[in-house]
Image (tube, helix red, strand yellow):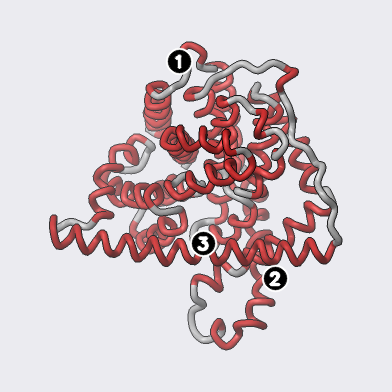
Amino acid sequence: MGFLFFITGILFVFLIAYLFSFNRKNVKYKRILIMLAVQIILVYFMMNTTVGLVIVTNVGEFFEGLIEIANAGIYFVFGGIVNEGEAPFIFSALLPLVFISVLIGILNYIKLLPLIIKYIGWILSKITGMGKLESYFAVSTAVLGQPEVFLTIIKQIPLLSQRRLYTICTSAMSAVSMAMVGAYMTMIEPKYVVTAVVLNIFSALIVANIINPYDLEEKDDLIGSDEEERVPFFQMVSQSVMDGLKLVVTVAAMLLGFIALIELINVIFLGTFQISFETLIGYIFAPIAFIMGIPWAEAVQAGSIMGTKLVTNEFVAMLSLGEISADLSAKTNAIISVYLVSFANFGTVGIVAGSIRSISEKQGNYVSKFALKLLLGATLASIISGTIMGLVI
């Protein structure tokens, strides 16, 4: 039965992506099948083998350990608040982002992250058949996140074709940064977060090969540059601290606004239609949840969380999942958890378009034109990742 739902989920993604494809005659079927096979092997290895489970568990414990280290600073600054009862969400999940941002800054400063990204990207390009730039960027965005990741290819962005621009933007929306991983792990199972990060790299490229297939000449395959202005170490640390704090404030502000907005919409819908907005979008997304492998009895609840992520963000959806996860099966929790680990929502489209526009106004304007198709591609990538997780649970 699991394989049947794998087929239905993948077919659904293919049909929708094919319908909106820029070039249906040039869809890269071989690349797609290779990447699907790699995903299945990877998720089976991570979820169903002793070695894989040990690796995934250790990665999860590593990030949990980083959060514990970050808590030393949080307790010192906010100890009187944090130590009384349950810690507020901003302390337990968001403030550790400041320390993780510093750690990423240090790893970048000593050139370790760029080296890892470069060679993993090279391996990925050999597996997927995609350009070196696309593969480099797919790995970069899974580490750095956006908008920072666009700075790693700042010289290449003005030179990219519109097709290649769509592919890298889809990767940016489908992946999540290393800084965010720790926060996600405070809300959903760490092993699902780790698995989703790996799956999403391939899922985004699969969708791009359907919606946005193209052939690339070797001479046009520009790769990301490691060249950047060298600043003193402690200046870099200070800047990383401020970058992390800005991220905390941004996410906290978005949560305040979106959760309040959802509550307002719920009040309006309940008063007018006698049904909550979350329940309504649950019915809309329920068929999609079902063909991904979620039992029909839980499809409306799962669909509600999927829709919430799309119209708000993954944090709001993860909080909603946490409220009902005990009532859902292990399979549903696994599929939805993996689905949620990406930046595919309306707000992120604006961030991506704005980031590109800050580098090249012409390219930014083009991204704005295909914004809805970009959101569609990133959402379909999340469906692929969730569907593949359902295959092995």
Percent coordinates x, y for residue 209 in the rendering = 53, 23
Q: What residue type is labelled 2?
A: Ile
Q: Quadrant where the N terminus lies?
A: top left
Q: How far apart in space, not on screen, are marks 3 and 2 (Cα)?
A: 21 Å
Q: Is residue 13 visible?
A: yes
**What secondary structure is found at the residue carrying circle 2?**
helix
Alpha carbon separation for disc pair 1 and 3: 38 Å
* Labelled disc at residue 251: 3
**Residue 296 vertical placement versus 213 (above, below):** below
User: Which residue is the site of mark 2?
Assistant: 69
Earlier-in-chain disc, 1 versus 2 = 1
Which residue is at 61% across, 85% downward? 79
Q: Which of these two is toward me, 3 or 344?
A: 344
Is 123 above or below relative to 390? above
Q: Which x, y percent locates residue 49?
A: 61, 42
Three-letter amino acid code at the position of disc 1? Arg
* Circle 2 residues within 10 Å: few <14, some 14–19, many ≥20: some
Q: Are marks 3 and 2 in contact (CB under 8 Å)?
A: no
Left/right of residue 287 with respect to residue 119 in the rendered view: left
Q: Earlier in the sequence, mark 3 or mark 2?
A: 2
Query: Which residue sits at x=51%, y=46%?
Result: 342
Q: Which of marks 1 and 3 is nearer the N terminus?
A: 1
Q: Which residue is drawn at 49% across and 71% down?
A: 89
Front residue of 9/204: it is 204
Q: Which one is closest to the eye, mark 1 or mark 2? A: 1
- Mark 1 vs 2: CB contact within 8 A: no
Place residue 231 in its image quadrant: bottom right
**In this image, 40 relative to 122: left or right?**
left
Label 1, on which residue?
Answer: 24
